[in-house]
Image (cartoon, grey):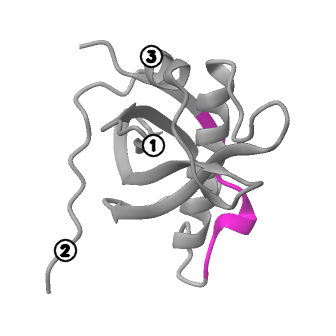
Amino acid sequence: MARVKIELPEQLDFHTQLPVRIGDINYGGHVGNDAILSIIHEARLRFLANFGFGELDKDGQAGLIMADAALVYKGEGFHGDIFDIAVGADDFTPFGFDLYYRITTVRGDKTILIAEAKSGMIYFDYQTRKVARLPEEWKQTLSPVK
């Protein structure tokens, strides 16, 4: 069976922390896959807000829409863990970009890698219901320094 592979950029400079809530735990006793998507959604909002952006423009007429998502699990997360989510943007096109995420937690003196993820973000005009050009300001602001 072919496995999903995500090649994270070397630098993911934005970090945010989120506690694992009891509602994030599934019947296996660890963080569920649906919770990981919710966690990266919150991390994405915080990442964008850090740069003065939101998922919608000021008029609510255009903004980001998720085109795809990929998750690769590397370890288990448990209730009470504090996840550190590193986020960065890369692979810009005229219409969007990819966001990359690395989720870790610290237990005792060890840093545990929980998951790596990628979400493909497209700029979307909600009035015309069509893909729109990504504002140049977004690319200039979110692009990693290389």
Q: Return the x and y of residue 97 as percentages of the image width and height.
A: 41, 41
Residue range corresponding to the magenta coloring: 17-26
Asked if residue 78 can be seen in this view, the reply is: no
Q: Nearer the viewer, residue 145 or 76?
A: 145
Residue that protrudes farthest toward the top in the picture: 145
Residue contact at pointers 3 and 2, CB within 8 angstroms: no
Q: Nearer the viewer, residue 36 or 119?
A: 119
Residue type, label 2: Arg
Depicted 86 relative to depicted 26: above or below:
above
Residue 38 vs residue 99: left or right? right
Residue visible at 56% across and 75% down in the picture: 29
Would you say residue 22 sits in the magenta stretch? Answer: yes
Residue type, label 1: Gly
Would you say residue 118 sits in the magenta stretch? Answer: no
Q: Return the x and y of residue 94 as percentages of the image width and height.
A: 40, 38
Residue that protrudes farthest toward the left in the picture: 1
Which residue was labeled with disc 2?
3
Residue type, label 3: Gln
